[in-house]
Image (cartoon, rainbow, N blue to C red):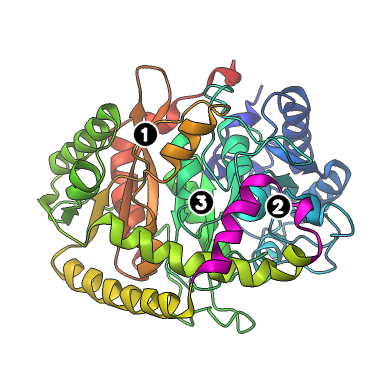
Amino acid sequence: MTDFAYLTIAEAAQRLYNRDISPVEYTQALLDRIAAHDGSLHSFLHVCGDHALDSAKVAEAEILAGEWRGPMHGVPYALKDIIDAAGEPTTCHSKVMARNSVPETDAHVTAKFREAGAVLVGKTATHEFAIGGPSFDLPWPPARNPWNPAHFTGGSSSGSGAALAAGFVPAALGTDTGGSVRNPASLCGLVGMKATYGRVSRRGVFPLSFTLDHVGPMTRTVEDNAILLNVIAGHDAQDPGSSPAEKPNFTARLDRDIKGMRIGVIRHFFEHDLEADSEMAKSINDAVEVLRGLGAEVSDMTLSPLDTYAAANRVILLPEAYAIHEKWFQERPEDYGELARRRIMGGAFIRAADYVNATRVKARLVQEYEEAMRGFDVAITASSMDPACEIENEEEAERTYGRQARTPFNLTGAPAMSVPTGFSKAGLPLSMQIAAKNFDEALIYQVAHAYEKATNWTEQRPPLAA
């Protein structure tokens, strides 16, 4: 029997290509698992079962005819429900969009998956408009963490994180404006990549901040993540933020060793600017020693304090978000959940002068990061400062949400990825973050893959697996 739930994309692709399994049985097995278990996790807002099986049948016929499209052909995946898929609802997890929100066209990334022959299983939970959660006053409940359903998944790509960790899909997309791919990856024991700004098109994705938004792949392994980025990366002339930079094969460097690689540790982010949970900090330091043992040259590096990044991110993000929502705020503010309404409303009170000054700070921080990275190949720091808190502890969720080191890489636009580094004594995932120079995602994958091979964290399964 095949354990479809925890097949990696790489494993599934080989079996599908060899015709050892079929896209239809693979998709049906995952749909059955979702039906059996998602009632307690709420990772999906919408499961498109019939359409998924129709797509799987098409993929199966193509594979049998020898028309192989690549490693995502016949592989199920999920989309954060702010990303459009033609004919499927996009609700943004909000009453505001709960009706009459079925797009006629795919987002650019969805079209890329369709071209690759992938099978869309459903749309996953998010924080309301990617900013408001976890919230309990919305049309759908928030997603819960498969490692312990009493705990938070991280957000805002919360359902994508839960669905992956639970074995509902091997691939999912999230979005990342201040860390919303890397946060659920951190708290759910996953690999989450925020590629370089402009590497992945955002067309067809409901915006939060045009200046800071990214779309990113979420998976259970490093190789799978690189496979997904191969599918979705590339220039899109219809996205003004899209870059024409040449796209490499992101899997090409995975098996290279890291001897002599220069790794900078941004230690002050998690030891001085914010003091990380002791188990989280130890896991990062232990991971650094693993990389040193693999031959990397490791030394500390210094950037501006986290507070500087956080303030600039906030002053840019909030007024941009308010500008997007202003009309609805004037016409139907009662249709927003309390958290999203309060957070977005803050953007109405930020002065134009403050916004302009924040963009100047951003430019300075970009230059500072580029100069600091001249002496290093990659940088390592914390992603989240704490393991997942209890989801219904509103005070703790609010306290820990901002305790992170992800926003620096949204501001600079540099690529950054969250990688599992172990588990707390309570059995909750721990993580680190690996960053690089612009468009050097392949180096991040190389380091992360070397670390993954030297440890076994991505082989662990939450209790749901039993």
SS of the residue at dot 3? loop
Question: Residue 299: horizontal and vertical position, in percent?
Answer: 10, 52
Question: Mark 3 sits on what residue?
Answer: 180
Disc 3 residue type (three-letter): Ser
Callout 3: few (<14), some (14-19), or many (20+) C-alpha neighbours within 10 Å? many
SS of the residue at dot 2? loop
Relative side of 129 to 187, left or right: right
Task: Give me the C-alpha separation between circle 1 and circle 3.
Answer: 15 Å
Foreground of the two, 240 or 199 = 240
State yes or no: residue 340 in magenta. yes
Residue 249 visible, this angle = no
SS of the residue at dot 1? loop
> Which of the 4 image quadrants contains residue 321?
bottom right
Relative side of 315 to 259, left or right: right
What main secondary structure does the magenta stretch of the protein show? helix
Question: Mark 1 sits on what residue?
Answer: 386
Residue 333 visible, this angle = yes
Earlier along the polypeptide chain: callout 3 or callout 2?
2
Question: Mark 2 sits on what residue?
Answer: 81
Residue at 80% across / 56% down in the picture? Answer: 97
Callout 2: few (<14), some (14-19), or many (20+) C-alpha neighbours within 10 Å? many
State yes or no: residue 264 in magenta. no
Question: Residue 108: horizontal and vertical position, in percent?
Answer: 67, 69
Residue at 66% across / 44% down in the picture? Answer: 16
Task: Give me the C-alpha separation between circle 3 and circle 2.
Answer: 13 Å
Relative side of 43 to 436, left or right: right
Residue at 31% across / 52% down in the picture? Answer: 434
Magenta part of the protein: which range? 331-350
Disc 1 residue type (three-letter): Asp
Question: Residue 63: horizontal and vertical position, in percent?
Answer: 73, 52
